[in-house]
């Protein structure tokens, strides 16, 4: 059994657990918190399938906060179970949700990483291929965009560790410089277009020293 099939079976198991929980709730079982457990569980299982299938579901910004909420809930529930006398029914719900939430926390945290090709739009994938082609022939690329109040200068380089964007912003208020690193060109394209107003078509190769026009 390969890893991908194992992940799919895991997601199917979580889905089955969710269905069993819904059936138990409809049959009159559960507690007042059971609908909340099922709602959060349904959302988490959706993210789990998205992570395994490498598909986009909802917004990437929501998955890591959801993983954080699940982690906090696990800690709270464990504290309650260790310090409070609970009914067998409530103890079962809490213990089951805590155990099966651990793996979800890990996978949803990774799923919420924006630096992945799966979150890229088709336009960003096309621009990423164009950027890759430019960087394959040039050690670095530069682009400068201007408007009435601000000038953005961007230098992009590629290394074994990924991609680096060095950004300089100039305005009447002063100058700001910062760098960002990415593993995938799709994420770099997203960052450039959203935060620097630079597109791939704005880039030009950096001139190489010593390769000037002959005298």
Image (cartoon, rainbow, N blue to C red):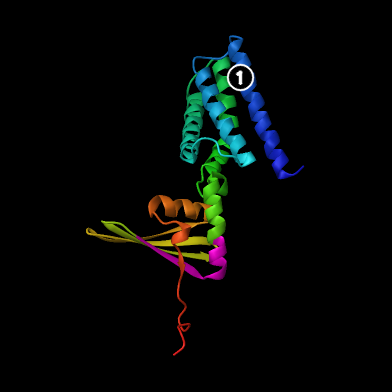
Q: Is residue 138 magenta?
A: yes
Instruction: Check disc 1 and report its element: helix, strand or loop.
Output: helix
Q: Quadrant of the C terminus?
A: bottom left
- Report x, y in % for residue 140: 48, 68
The furthest residue to the top: 28
The one of 109 and 119 positioned closer to us in this rendering: 119
Q: Quadrant of residue 5?
A: top right
- Report x, y in % for residue 30: 56, 14
- Report x, y in % for residue 209: 45, 81
Q: Quadrant of residue 97?
A: top right
Q: Is residue 210 above or below residue 62?
A: below
Q: On the image, numbered disc 1 is attached to which residue?
A: 21
Q: Is residue 126 above or below residue 215?
A: above
The furthest residue to the left: 172
- Report x, y in % for residue 194: 41, 50
Q: Quadrant of residue 89?
A: top right
User: Which portion, as a residue range, is magenta?
Assistant: 132-145
């Amino acid at each position: 059994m390969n890893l991908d099939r194992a992940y799919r079976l895991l997601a199917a198991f979580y889905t089955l657990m969710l269905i069993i929980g819904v059936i138990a709730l409809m049959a009159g079982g559960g507690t007042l918190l059971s609908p909340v457990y099922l709602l959060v569980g349904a959302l988490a299982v959706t993210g789990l399938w998205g992570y395994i299938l490498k598909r986009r579901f909802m917004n990437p910004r929501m998955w890591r906060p959801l993983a954080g909420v699940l982690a906090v809930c696990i800690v709270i529930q464990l504290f309650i179970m260790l310090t409070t006398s609970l009914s067998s029914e409530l103890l079962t719900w809490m213990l089951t949700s805590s155990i099966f939430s651990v793996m979800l926390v890990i996978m949803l945290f990774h799923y919420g990483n924006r630096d992945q090709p799966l979150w890229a739009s088709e336009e960003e994938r096309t621009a990423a291929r164009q950027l890759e082609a430019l960087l394959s022939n040039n050690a670095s690329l530069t682009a400068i965009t201007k408007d009435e109040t601000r000038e953005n200068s961007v230098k992009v380089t590629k290394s074994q560790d990924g991609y680096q964007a060095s950004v300089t912003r100039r305005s009447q208020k002063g100058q700001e410089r910062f760098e960002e690193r990415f593993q995938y060109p799709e994420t770099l394209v997203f960052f450039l277009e959203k935060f620097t107003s630079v597109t791939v078509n704005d880039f030009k190769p950096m001139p190489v020293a010593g390769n000037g026009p002959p005298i």
